[in-house]
Image (cartoon, rainbow, N blue to C red):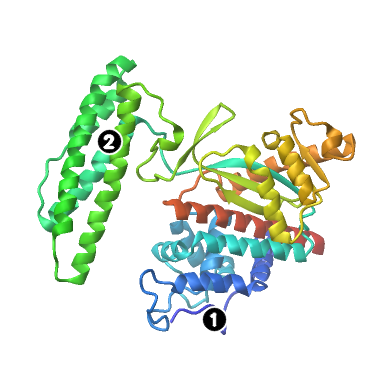
Amino acid sequence: MRQTQREQLFLVPNVPTHVHARELQCISGLLDELPDAVELVHKDLIRREGKEDADVTKGREGMTAEQVLRALVVKQTTQCSYEELSFHLADSNTYRWFCRIGIDQEAPQKSTLQKNVKKIRPETWAEINRKIVLAASAKGVEKGVKVRTDCTVVESSIHAPTDATLLYDSVRVLVRLMGESKKIFGFDFINHERSAKRQALAVRNAKSFEKRVPHYRILLKSTNKAVRSAASIASKIERLKLKEAADDERRQRLAAQIRHYLVLATRVIAQTERRVLRKESVPAEEKVVSIFEPHTDIIVKGRRDTHYGHKICLSTGKSGLVTDVVIEEGNPADSTLAVRMIERQRDLYGKVPRQASFDGGFASRDNLVSIKKLGVEDVAFAKRRGIEITEMVKSTWVYRKLRNFRAGVEGNISFLKRAFGLDRCTWSGLNSFKSYVYSSVLACNLLIIARDVLANSS
């Protein structure tokens, strides 16, 4: 039976005096003070999709909830892969101690680590982070009196999309799935992958748009043929009736996979025809930029750089602690987010901050009036956009202080991206994307609290 935590620890080595080891020791103490966090992880670990009536007292023991939580903190803090994490837990006495792995225990393999971390829902990581922020408030690390807000982009793990590469990706994935159906059920098909690859390369090497169009027409024809073949095979698979439950489950899973990629391939064909053949401008919200990460949004920052991922809105305090993070849908204007972020601070702390500072993109008179009505005394926008300083704050001196305070959020974002991998998510799927963001913020907050506690105790 899987346990929440061990009643009695195995023999573990002493922690060295290195600064990183002392930080881990402090983080360990913080996690010990949050038993509810371990309980939340444990609930997700024993939760079984479609098997709500399963007996959770049976089965292999596996990693404890405490070990999973602490292993994730190590992973996000060190930005190592699961394979590297498995090695660290096998080789490092300090990491073994931190993750509560005894001397005589075998370190978990990379597949075990990945499987257990994957089970934890993004909502769980968000709730644990909320508990950590409140614990920081109780320790006096961050009171939430002064808050700064800004947005950034976390990129998905995809290559820069083009219509040709998306069409070729669609063909090769459908061919792979049809090949699997042929191997299992004997359904034959014509393979158009080589033709699609040849035309995709020709499009990439063409010197002008006019020379690309003929190759696009052939590529579209190959993709349409692959889509029709896959649709036919999916229908045949769905009509099959298998006696064995395991075989029938595999049949349903394969048919669902083909149907999933058929929808995306059809959208890719439609957008290519509109963009290339009819020379239409396709709105960003209608575009598919990856068939592997279809949740990815197109984010254009300041009419300059184009990013493929998700926009996130962050609130940080004077200590640098990330008190709130929201993963946005699409690319909403910053000016539509200001009031909501203050309301979320009120819901978190039970009161609004006394002072709030925002980037110039959040500035509007309506936002100023609404935030003031919530009870915030001083509101500063980095760019005034026609708003008088005396309308926002008490004096020019206060405005200058808050404007300089807001600049610090850029350093907070840089710290998250450099040290905790928040520049690019390496996990697959929308839920995993959210989990990656929340867990990176969680690890960052734990380190900030630990460093504050160590600084005040020395």
| Residue 399 seen anywhere in this rendered image of the structure | yes
Q: Which residue lies at the image location 32% right of the left edge and 38% below the top edge?
A: 267
Q: Which residue lies at the image location 9% right of the left edge and 48% below the top edge?
A: 188
363 sits left or right of 400 in the view:
left
- Locate the N terminus by quadrant: bottom left
Look at label 1 and name its amino acid: Arg
Q: In the rendered image, which quarter is residue 378 located in?
A: top right
Residue 160: x %, y % from top left: 42, 34
Residue 170: x %, y % from top left: 28, 40
- Locate the C terminus by quadrant: bottom right
Q: Is residue 422 above or below residue 452?
A: above
| Secondary structure state at the residue bearing disc 2 | helix
> Which residue corresponds to mark 2?
168
> Which residue corresponds to mark 1?
6
Give the mark, 2 or 1, whose residue is nearer the N terminus. 1
Residue 277: x %, y % from top left: 30, 22
Q: Which residue lies at the image location 42% right of the left edge and 80% below the top edge?
A: 56
| Secondary structure state at the residue bearing disc 1 | loop
Indicate which disc residue 59 carries: none
282 sits left or right of 39 in the view:
left
413 sits left or right of 289 in the view:
right
How would you rate the neighbour count of disc 2 (Cα within 10 Å): few for under 14, some for 14-19, many for 20 or more?
many
Residue 346: x %, y % from top left: 72, 56
